[in-house]
Amino acid sequence: VIAALAGGVGAARLLRGLVRAVPPGDVVAIVNTGDDDIFHGLSVSPDLDTVTYTLAGAVNLETGWGLAGDTFRGNEALRRYGVPTWFRLGDLDLATHLYRTERLRAGATLSEVTREITGAWGLETRLLPMSDDPVRTIIEVAGGDGEGPQALRMQEWFVGRRCEPPVLDVRFDGAAGAAAAPEVLDVIAGADVVVICPSNPIISIGPILAVPGIRAAVARRRDRVVAISPIIAGAPVKGPADRLMGPLGYEVSCVGIARAYADLCATLVIDELDRSRAAEVERGGLRAVVAPTLMTDAGAAEQLARIALAAVG
Ligand code: GDP
Ligand code: CA
Protein backbone atom coordinates (compact mmCIF):
# COMPACT_ATOMS: atom_id res chain seq x y z
CA VAL A 1 0.00 0.00 0.00
CA ILE A 2 1.08 3.54 -0.79
CA ALA A 3 -0.24 6.09 1.70
CA ALA A 4 -0.37 9.68 0.48
CA LEU A 5 -0.87 12.80 2.60
CA ALA A 6 -2.91 15.06 0.38
CA GLY A 7 -4.26 18.58 0.09
CA GLY A 8 -6.16 19.68 -3.01
CA VAL A 9 -4.87 20.55 -6.46
CA GLY A 10 -1.15 19.73 -6.10
CA ALA A 11 -1.96 16.44 -4.39
CA ALA A 12 -4.63 15.52 -6.93
CA ARG A 13 -2.17 16.08 -9.77
CA LEU A 14 0.34 13.72 -8.20
CA LEU A 15 -2.29 11.12 -7.30
CA ARG A 16 -3.44 11.08 -10.91
CA GLY A 17 0.10 9.95 -11.77
CA LEU A 18 0.46 7.63 -8.80
CA VAL A 19 -2.59 5.59 -9.85
CA ARG A 20 -0.97 5.10 -13.27
CA ALA A 21 2.28 3.93 -11.66
CA VAL A 22 0.73 1.40 -9.25
CA PRO A 23 -2.71 -0.26 -9.12
CA PRO A 24 -5.21 2.42 -8.00
CA GLY A 25 -6.51 0.07 -5.32
CA ASP A 26 -3.07 0.09 -3.67
CA VAL A 27 -3.22 3.83 -3.01
CA VAL A 28 -4.83 5.33 0.09
CA ALA A 29 -4.99 9.13 0.27
CA ILE A 30 -5.26 10.78 3.67
CA VAL A 31 -6.86 14.10 2.86
CA ASN A 32 -6.89 17.51 4.55
CA THR A 33 -10.26 18.62 5.89
CA GLY A 34 -9.06 21.87 7.47
CA ASP A 35 -10.53 23.79 4.51
CA ASP A 36 -13.98 22.29 5.05
CA ASP A 37 -16.67 24.83 5.68
CA ILE A 38 -20.39 25.41 5.53
CA PHE A 39 -21.83 27.53 2.73
CA HIS A 40 -25.58 28.16 2.44
CA GLY A 41 -26.08 25.40 4.96
CA LEU A 42 -24.10 22.88 2.90
CA SER A 43 -21.08 20.92 4.12
CA VAL A 44 -18.29 21.51 1.62
CA SER A 45 -15.02 19.53 1.67
CA PRO A 46 -12.90 21.19 -1.01
CA ASP A 47 -9.82 18.97 -0.89
CA LEU A 48 -11.74 15.68 -0.76
CA ASP A 49 -13.79 16.81 -3.76
CA THR A 50 -10.77 18.01 -5.74
CA VAL A 51 -9.05 14.65 -5.29
CA THR A 52 -12.26 12.72 -6.05
CA TYR A 53 -13.08 14.66 -9.21
CA THR A 54 -9.49 14.50 -10.43
CA LEU A 55 -9.17 10.75 -9.96
CA ALA A 56 -12.58 10.31 -11.61
CA GLY A 57 -11.32 12.24 -14.64
CA ALA A 58 -14.13 14.76 -14.10
CA VAL A 59 -12.23 17.74 -12.73
CA ASN A 60 -12.09 21.10 -14.45
CA LEU A 61 -8.48 20.97 -15.62
CA GLU A 62 -8.21 24.74 -16.08
CA THR A 63 -8.97 25.60 -12.46
CA GLY A 64 -7.89 22.29 -10.94
CA TRP A 65 -11.08 22.22 -8.82
CA GLY A 66 -14.78 21.79 -9.56
CA LEU A 67 -16.31 19.75 -12.35
CA ALA A 68 -15.41 20.13 -16.02
CA GLY A 69 -18.15 21.93 -17.93
CA ASP A 70 -19.98 23.01 -14.78
CA THR A 71 -22.06 26.19 -14.70
CA PHE A 72 -22.71 28.56 -11.80
CA ARG A 73 -26.30 29.59 -12.34
CA GLY A 74 -27.45 28.57 -8.88
CA ASN A 75 -24.62 30.49 -7.29
CA GLU A 76 -25.51 33.57 -9.34
CA ALA A 77 -29.20 33.23 -8.47
CA LEU A 78 -28.28 33.41 -4.79
CA ARG A 79 -27.17 37.02 -5.33
CA ARG A 80 -30.81 38.01 -5.45
CA TYR A 81 -31.00 37.29 -1.73
CA GLY A 82 -27.96 39.38 -0.95
CA VAL A 83 -25.98 36.50 0.53
CA PRO A 84 -22.21 36.35 -0.06
CA THR A 85 -21.48 34.31 -3.16
CA TRP A 86 -17.68 34.66 -3.34
CA PHE A 87 -17.24 30.95 -2.70
CA ARG A 88 -18.39 29.63 -6.05
CA LEU A 89 -20.28 26.37 -6.04
CA GLY A 90 -21.02 24.85 -9.45
CA ASP A 91 -24.48 23.60 -10.34
CA LEU A 92 -23.37 19.99 -10.78
CA ASP A 93 -20.92 20.22 -7.90
CA LEU A 94 -23.88 21.18 -5.67
CA ALA A 95 -25.15 17.61 -5.90
CA THR A 96 -22.07 16.41 -4.01
CA HIS A 97 -22.57 18.99 -1.25
CA LEU A 98 -26.29 18.28 -0.99
CA TYR A 99 -25.61 14.57 -0.68
CA ARG A 100 -22.81 15.00 1.87
CA THR A 101 -24.85 17.41 3.98
CA GLU A 102 -27.87 15.14 4.09
CA ARG A 103 -25.80 12.07 5.00
CA LEU A 104 -23.91 13.89 7.75
CA ARG A 105 -27.21 15.21 9.10
CA ALA A 106 -28.51 11.62 9.17
CA GLY A 107 -25.57 10.67 11.38
CA ALA A 108 -23.05 9.22 8.93
CA THR A 109 -19.38 10.05 9.55
CA LEU A 110 -17.35 12.00 6.99
CA SER A 111 -15.36 8.80 6.37
CA GLU A 112 -18.54 6.92 5.52
CA VAL A 113 -19.88 9.67 3.27
CA THR A 114 -16.51 9.94 1.53
CA ARG A 115 -16.55 6.21 0.84
CA GLU A 116 -20.03 6.54 -0.64
CA ILE A 117 -19.08 9.51 -2.82
CA THR A 118 -15.85 7.99 -4.12
CA GLY A 119 -17.70 4.71 -4.75
CA ALA A 120 -20.34 6.54 -6.77
CA TRP A 121 -17.56 8.09 -8.86
CA GLY A 122 -16.08 4.64 -9.45
CA LEU A 123 -12.77 5.23 -7.67
CA GLU A 124 -10.69 2.23 -6.68
CA THR A 125 -8.38 4.45 -4.65
CA ARG A 126 -9.46 4.93 -1.05
CA LEU A 127 -9.78 8.46 0.32
CA LEU A 128 -9.69 8.89 4.07
CA PRO A 129 -10.49 12.26 5.59
CA MET A 130 -7.74 13.03 8.12
CA SER A 131 -10.42 13.11 10.83
CA ASP A 132 -14.17 12.70 11.17
CA ASP A 133 -14.13 15.53 13.72
CA PRO A 134 -14.31 19.09 12.44
CA VAL A 135 -10.94 20.84 12.22
CA ARG A 136 -10.93 24.40 10.92
CA THR A 137 -7.86 26.15 9.57
CA ILE A 138 -7.84 29.74 10.78
CA ILE A 139 -5.59 32.39 9.26
CA GLU A 140 -4.71 35.24 11.59
CA VAL A 141 -4.13 38.37 9.58
CA ALA A 142 -3.21 41.95 10.32
CA GLY A 143 -6.29 44.13 10.72
CA GLY A 144 -6.74 47.51 9.04
CA ASP A 145 -5.53 50.83 10.49
CA GLY A 146 -5.81 50.78 14.25
CA GLU A 147 -7.46 47.38 14.29
CA GLY A 148 -6.07 44.32 16.00
CA PRO A 149 -5.40 41.01 14.28
CA GLN A 150 -8.35 39.33 12.59
CA ALA A 151 -9.09 35.61 12.47
CA LEU A 152 -10.33 34.45 9.07
CA ARG A 153 -11.52 31.01 8.10
CA MET A 154 -9.25 29.54 5.45
CA GLN A 155 -11.71 30.01 2.57
CA GLU A 156 -12.49 33.57 3.70
CA TRP A 157 -8.81 34.46 3.44
CA PHE A 158 -8.04 32.38 0.36
CA VAL A 159 -11.10 32.98 -1.81
CA GLY A 160 -13.00 35.80 -0.14
CA ARG A 161 -9.95 38.06 0.42
CA ARG A 162 -7.74 36.62 -2.35
CA CYS A 163 -4.89 35.93 0.11
CA GLU A 164 -4.29 39.68 0.34
CA PRO A 165 -4.30 40.29 4.12
CA PRO A 166 -0.74 39.63 5.36
CA VAL A 167 -0.54 36.49 7.47
CA LEU A 168 0.52 36.67 11.12
CA ASP A 169 -0.16 33.09 12.16
CA VAL A 170 -2.13 29.95 11.36
CA ARG A 171 -3.99 27.69 13.72
CA PHE A 172 -6.13 24.57 13.38
CA ASP A 173 -9.20 24.94 15.55
CA GLY A 174 -10.46 21.63 16.87
CA ALA A 175 -7.31 19.72 15.94
CA ALA A 176 -6.05 19.12 19.48
CA GLY A 177 -9.28 17.35 20.44
CA ALA A 178 -9.79 15.58 17.11
CA ALA A 179 -9.16 11.90 16.48
CA ALA A 180 -7.56 10.55 13.34
CA ALA A 181 -10.26 8.96 11.18
CA PRO A 182 -10.55 5.16 11.31
CA GLU A 183 -7.70 3.40 9.48
CA VAL A 184 -5.55 6.52 9.10
CA LEU A 185 -2.92 5.59 11.69
CA ASP A 186 -2.91 1.91 10.66
CA VAL A 187 -2.50 2.78 6.99
CA ILE A 188 0.50 5.00 7.78
CA ALA A 189 2.02 2.35 10.06
CA GLY A 190 1.59 -0.43 7.50
CA ALA A 191 2.30 1.38 4.23
CA ASP A 192 5.20 0.31 2.03
CA VAL A 193 5.75 3.97 1.19
CA VAL A 194 4.28 7.17 2.59
CA VAL A 195 4.19 10.04 0.09
CA ILE A 196 3.81 13.63 1.21
CA CYS A 197 2.19 15.15 -1.89
CA PRO A 198 3.37 18.50 -3.33
CA SER A 199 0.72 20.35 -1.35
CA ASN A 200 0.84 23.54 0.64
CA PRO A 201 2.96 22.58 3.68
CA ILE A 202 1.24 25.02 6.04
CA ILE A 203 -2.47 24.77 5.26
CA SER A 204 -2.78 21.44 3.41
CA ILE A 205 -0.26 19.12 5.08
CA GLY A 206 -0.11 21.16 8.33
CA PRO A 207 -3.69 20.37 9.44
CA ILE A 208 -3.22 16.63 8.76
CA LEU A 209 -0.09 16.59 10.94
CA ALA A 210 -1.92 18.55 13.65
CA VAL A 211 -4.39 15.71 14.24
CA PRO A 212 -3.06 13.92 17.34
CA GLY A 213 -1.05 10.83 16.45
CA ILE A 214 -0.55 11.49 12.75
CA ARG A 215 2.73 13.42 12.92
CA ALA A 216 4.25 10.78 15.19
CA ALA A 217 2.96 7.95 12.98
CA VAL A 218 4.61 9.52 9.91
CA ALA A 219 7.85 10.31 11.76
CA ARG A 220 8.08 6.68 12.87
CA ARG A 221 8.14 5.68 9.18
CA ARG A 222 10.65 8.39 8.24
CA ASP A 223 12.88 6.08 6.18
CA ARG A 224 9.90 5.09 4.03
CA VAL A 225 8.52 8.63 3.65
CA VAL A 226 9.17 10.69 0.53
CA ALA A 227 7.95 14.26 0.00
CA ILE A 228 7.73 16.20 -3.24
CA SER A 229 8.45 19.91 -3.06
CA PRO A 230 5.49 22.12 -4.03
CA ILE A 231 7.98 24.97 -4.37
CA ILE A 232 9.95 25.25 -7.60
CA ALA A 233 12.68 27.88 -8.03
CA GLY A 234 11.53 29.82 -4.99
CA ALA A 235 7.84 30.04 -5.87
CA PRO A 236 4.73 27.89 -5.52
CA VAL A 237 3.43 26.47 -8.79
CA LYS A 238 -0.02 27.72 -7.79
CA GLY A 239 -1.62 29.10 -4.65
CA PRO A 240 -0.43 31.04 -1.63
CA ALA A 241 2.26 28.84 -0.07
CA ASP A 242 4.69 31.77 -0.29
CA ARG A 243 2.33 34.05 1.63
CA LEU A 244 2.19 31.50 4.46
CA MET A 245 5.70 30.02 4.60
CA GLY A 246 7.47 33.37 4.89
CA PRO A 247 5.59 34.74 7.91
CA LEU A 248 5.84 31.36 9.64
CA GLY A 249 9.62 31.40 9.35
CA TYR A 250 10.26 29.09 6.40
CA GLU A 251 12.28 30.17 3.41
CA VAL A 252 10.08 29.93 0.30
CA SER A 253 12.18 27.29 -1.42
CA CYS A 254 12.77 23.56 -1.49
CA VAL A 255 15.20 24.17 1.38
CA GLY A 256 12.34 25.62 3.43
CA ILE A 257 10.27 22.55 2.56
CA ALA A 258 13.15 20.34 3.69
CA ARG A 259 13.26 22.18 6.99
CA ALA A 260 9.48 21.87 7.47
CA TYR A 261 9.59 18.11 6.85
CA ALA A 262 13.02 17.19 8.26
CA ASP A 263 11.60 15.07 11.08
CA LEU A 264 9.08 13.35 8.81
CA CYS A 265 10.78 12.21 5.62
CA ALA A 266 14.18 10.88 4.70
CA THR A 267 13.81 11.81 1.03
CA LEU A 268 12.71 15.01 -0.69
CA VAL A 269 12.15 15.26 -4.44
CA ILE A 270 13.15 18.71 -5.67
CA ASP A 271 12.87 20.21 -9.13
CA GLU A 272 15.65 20.27 -11.72
CA LEU A 273 15.57 24.06 -11.47
CA ASP A 274 16.62 23.66 -7.83
CA ARG A 275 19.54 21.35 -8.50
CA SER A 276 21.94 23.93 -7.05
CA ARG A 277 20.16 23.67 -3.68
CA ALA A 278 20.41 19.90 -3.31
CA ALA A 279 23.45 20.15 -1.04
CA GLU A 280 21.62 22.49 1.34
CA VAL A 281 18.66 20.10 1.47
CA GLU A 282 21.04 17.27 2.31
CA ARG A 283 22.74 19.31 5.02
CA GLY A 284 19.31 19.32 6.70
CA GLY A 285 19.49 15.53 6.98
CA LEU A 286 17.32 14.59 3.98
CA ARG A 287 18.33 12.92 0.76
CA ALA A 288 17.59 15.16 -2.22
CA VAL A 289 16.38 13.57 -5.44
CA VAL A 290 16.40 15.93 -8.42
CA ALA A 291 13.65 15.42 -11.01
CA PRO A 292 11.21 17.30 -13.25
CA THR A 293 8.39 18.07 -10.82
CA LEU A 294 6.07 20.25 -12.91
CA MET A 295 3.06 18.03 -13.59
CA THR A 296 1.93 19.43 -16.91
CA ASP A 297 -0.12 16.32 -17.70
CA ALA A 298 -0.89 12.84 -16.40
CA GLY A 299 2.21 11.43 -18.08
CA ALA A 300 4.48 13.89 -16.29
CA ALA A 301 2.71 13.13 -13.02
CA GLU A 302 3.17 9.40 -13.56
CA GLN A 303 6.88 9.85 -14.21
CA LEU A 304 7.23 11.95 -11.05
CA ALA A 305 5.32 9.37 -9.01
CA ARG A 306 7.61 6.60 -10.30
CA ILE A 307 10.70 8.61 -9.36
CA ALA A 308 9.33 9.28 -5.88
CA LEU A 309 8.51 5.61 -5.28
CA ALA A 310 11.85 4.44 -6.68
CA ALA A 311 13.65 6.86 -4.36
CA VAL A 312 12.35 4.94 -1.38
CA GLY A 313 13.15 1.63 -3.05
P1 GDP B 1 -5.04 23.28 -2.66
O1 GDP B 1 -5.84 22.84 -1.50
O2 GDP B 1 -5.79 23.18 -3.95
O3 GDP B 1 -4.28 24.53 -2.46
O4 GDP B 1 -4.02 22.11 -2.82
P2 GDP B 1 -2.58 21.71 -2.50
O5 GDP B 1 -2.06 22.27 -1.24
O6 GDP B 1 -2.51 20.23 -2.68
O7 GDP B 1 -1.90 22.33 -3.76
C1 GDP B 1 -1.26 23.56 -3.77
C2 GDP B 1 0.22 23.33 -3.92
O8 GDP B 1 0.45 22.47 -5.05
C3 GDP B 1 0.96 24.62 -4.21
O9 GDP B 1 1.88 24.87 -3.19
C4 GDP B 1 1.64 24.34 -5.56
O10 GDP B 1 2.93 24.87 -5.64
C5 GDP B 1 1.64 22.84 -5.67
N1 GDP B 1 1.60 22.35 -7.04
C6 GDP B 1 0.58 22.49 -7.91
N2 GDP B 1 0.92 21.94 -9.11
C7 GDP B 1 2.18 21.44 -8.98
C8 GDP B 1 3.08 20.76 -9.86
O11 GDP B 1 2.79 20.51 -11.03
N3 GDP B 1 4.31 20.41 -9.34
C9 GDP B 1 4.66 20.68 -8.05
N4 GDP B 1 5.88 20.29 -7.63
N5 GDP B 1 3.84 21.33 -7.21
C10 GDP B 1 2.62 21.69 -7.66
CA1 CA C 1 -7.34 23.09 -0.06
Image (cartoon, rainbow, N blue to C red):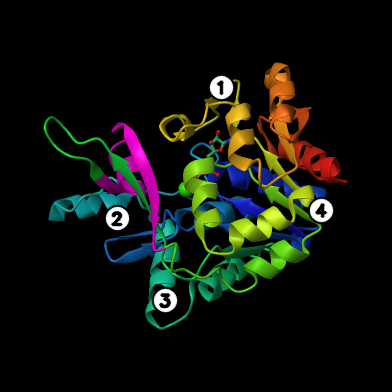
Instruction: Decide which of 66, 287 is in the foreground and name it.
Output: 287
In primary-sequence order, the first of circles 3 and 2 is 2
Q: Upstream in the sequence, badge 4 or badge 3?
A: 4
In the current view of this chain or complex, which residue is farthest to the right?
313
Residue type at mark 4 is: Val
Residue 158 drawn in magenta: yes
Ligand 1 location (quadrant): top right
Residue with the mark numbered 4: 22
Determine the CA span between mark 4 and mark 3: 32 Å
Foreground disc of the pair 1, 4: 1
Ranked by sequence position, the earlier of labels 3 and 1 is: 3
The residue that disc 1 covers is 234
Q: What amino acid is labelled 3 in the image? A: Leu
Q: Residue at x 51, y 67 (%)?
A: 131
Instruction: Indicate left or right for 287 with 42 as reference.
Output: right
Disc ID at residue 74: 2
Label 3 belongs to which residue? 104
Q: Identify the magenta region.
A: 151-174
x and y, in percent, of residue 220 in the image = 72, 57
Q: Are marks 3 and 2 in contact (CB under 8 Å)?
A: no
Image location (x, y in percent) of residue 94: 39, 60
Mark toward the viewer: 3 or 1: 1
- Other residues around mark 1 within 10 Å, as few (<14) / some (14–19) / many (≥20): some
Which residue is more in the foreground, 169 or 40? 169
Could you say where residue 124 lies in the image, as x and y percent from the top left?
71, 64
Q: Is residue 282 magenta?
A: no
Q: Secondary structure at mark 3?
A: helix
Q: Residue furthest bottom?
A: 106
